[in-house]
Image: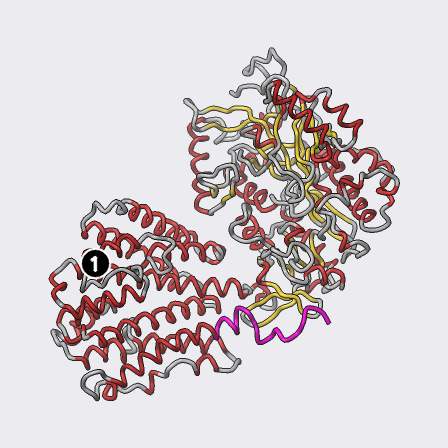
Amino acid sequence: MAAPAQPGHYDELRGSSALPDDNGADAAMAPAWRQFFSHPGTQNLADLNRRQASLEQQIRDNGVSYNVYADSNNPQRPWSLDLFPLIVQADEWRQIEAGVLQRVRLLENILHDVYGAQELLRDGLLPAALVQGHPGYLRTLHGIPPVGGNRLQVCAFDLARGPDGRWAVAAQRTQAPSGLGYALENRLSISRLFPQAFESLQVQRLASSYRALIDGLRSMSPAGADAHIAMLTPGPYNETYFEQAYLTRYLGITLVQGNDLTVRDNRLFLRTLRGLEPVDVLIKRVDDAWCDPLELRSDSSLGVPGLLQTLRSGNLLMANMPGSAFLESVGLLGFMPKLSRRLLNEELLLPSWPTWWCGEHAALQAATSHLAQCAIKPTYTGSALHGQFAGLQCSALDAHERAAWLERLHQSGEEFTLQQERPLSQMPTWDAQSKPPRIVPREVMLRVFALTDGAQSWRVLPGGLGRIVSTQDSVLSLQRGGSSADVWVRVDAERGHKVDRTTLLNKRITPATVAQYRRVVTSRAAENLFWLGRYTERSENSLRLARLTLSTLGSAGQSCLPLAKWLGSLAASCSLVPADVPSPLLARRVFARALVAGLGNPDSTASVGFNLRSLRQVASSIRERLSQEHWGLILRTEQQFMKHCADLVDGNYATLDVLRVLDSVSPNLAAMTGEQTDRMTRDDGWRLLSIGRQVERLDFLGMALARAFESGAVAESAGFEAVLALFDSTITFHAQYQRSRDVAALLELLVMSRENPRSLGWVVQTLRGRLTKLARDADDSLLALTPDPNQWALAQLCDDEGPLPALTQLLERCTGATWRVSDGISLRYFTHTHESSRSLGA
């Protein structure tokens, strides 16, 4: 059924090392794999293809993504998950579990010594160059005890199985280990595809370990069971942002960025719409150096000023505590056996891959004697103080290149670490693209996780993340491509163990606890929602104005000079054309071509393309609050519009071609409005989204109407109709007033009406209503910034002939109010400057 592993590799499917004379079909499968393939849905190739297609569709629908650095053309790609899981037997897992628990205890003891007595450095068991010479060692935290007793709460270990079937540690991650969210997503996806096999193989569940992590963090935090837990993310452009958002939803904790947080009186607080809320536990997904711009990297915008001071004060439990980055150096692996004997009085249960740090002469001599079988890796990965390069396989070098590297190793050996190349075990994977589709063996690594469940106590997640290697680069870095696999750890039934059926997906919520599950609206999320509304409205306004201008300049309306003057002035004010472009009164064709050229220009701050791109960027920061349909609609709209605009660049187009491009966007923007109106919860975040829309609409329509009267366009029939079209009110006006051209009727519909959503009266009334609900018990200073439509009188607006001064004054108040309200909202809800009178520390 499946080809054997390549000679020299351990064959996961058959449970043995592949030999040169393996014939594939005759080799017996391991019992667990035979049981897996005995279930319906695993035997028919056509059915496996259908399941593969279903899996890929599910990943696309869920928006599961990962940023692959090596792929410059499409860095954001769907998460790659293989159809088959990696099956680990119970006896094998016992060995892995014991070895990982020993390793995390060892790492904790190393940190305790390095940030304490430093006996390991004094006795020469740890080279100072790998600790104090490593930029990840934080001298500022020496002597600071960890809150809760642990410096490490989450650790990841990358394991590889050699040809002898034994697992070994190839790397360890302690700063901000990734993969917990992807491991959970993989499990949910694959177990649903093969439910019968999953049950019959008695695969251990994951939920109890995630619950133990959260319970353990709460028990160790200063606030105890009531602790507010948050996860610090670098933001939506981080390669693992999806899993961070996914994991926080699953665990019921808050996802935050650095600018969501502030330090006051040596405590960490979360900025929310309702003020500052204390944070007691912070799960860190930002590398140490970027956590605090006051004490670490001053150019960091990812961290929180004063964060390290909260640690010194004992007011915050951070998982993991900063300062462990030096443990991730591959050069440290070769010292672990001696460290284990010294600190634990134990031999390592889980060996390391053969590793030599070239900063030691003896190690350098031992490693370079068989350089061709080694990989060269940087000792100080990610350090700005040391030369950086992507690791490389020496087997790929020719004799000249190998000699050059030998010389380099002897000159600056401390910069490099050699790790022996070993054939990785190979697991069965499904290749749906081959003709015919078939099962093929591919190399795999295993990432396992140690999670704290209390002070100086850890457990190993019974599963993990299978990393299917696609290229040699994938062996060197998990960020350079490849695929993933779910990891099925079988229950040790012989010892009486049973499947733990704990679940976090169906939590029991009672009337007494329901309030605990209400989503916190952070100031950052609120600001992004506010701008999501503004950019949605700006996109609609710029699109409608561009379409009206182009269709008018190319039609009979071009003979109406006041109309051309109005549209030209409005387009220039809205930056749809550069400031130096002549008015359409002087050069109609030049003006039109400049407008078309700027439609898709992402650098023009008011173009349709710029607004759509800004809309997408803001939406990416709050994807967890948007439906998948809403997010997909935003992506497709921008991509399709920019593609169509690129086809217009050469100038070989007709006005109708451009209008068709603009027309194709209108339904998508209308659908976005529907998503925001009908498919989002009416919480304070949504109110700010709506306020953002109303602020933009009030400013744009107020300015447009003022310029229409100023230019005299309203006095002309074509201008009158153009004003109605820009306000999207043509049908309503003619249904109500037939063919009237009276200014009173126009102002009644576009200014006074409380039923027309494009009327200034409706917009101001809606804006005031949203502000009132947002303010609740707060003062109504923002409400006082807006004009009160109850005080408007149509007779007064139409009282004078000519320039209508009352109307002009009202429109000026409306447009001026938009910026005052915007600034007031920012100060009150986003920056909390009214609460910033205190310093970072007492």
Residue drawn where x is 75% and y is 27% of the image: 364
Residue 523 at what x, y percent from top left?
A: 54, 66
| Vertical side of 784 occupied by 473: above or below | above
Which quadrant would residue 560 be assigned to in this image?
bottom left
Residue 546 at what x, y percent from top left?
A: 26, 60
User: Is residue 674 something one can see in this rendering?
Assistant: no
Residue drawn where x is 32% and y is 62% of the image: 575
Q: Which residue is mark 1?
A: 550
| Vertical side of 556 occupied by 735: above or below | below
Horizontal side of 489 relative to 611 (left or right) equals right
Who is closer to the viewer here, 278 or 608? 608
For the residue labelled by badge 1, is the local secondary structure a helix, a strand or a loop?
Answer: helix
Residue bounds of the magenta highlight: 824-842
Residue 693 at what x, y percent from top left?
A: 38, 67
Who is closer to the viewer here, 131 or 91? 131
**Type of amino acid at the residue the image marks with label 1:** Leu
Instruction: Classify mark 1: residues with Cα within 10 Å, few (<14), some (14-19) or many (20+).
Output: many
Q: Is residue 692 magenta?
A: no
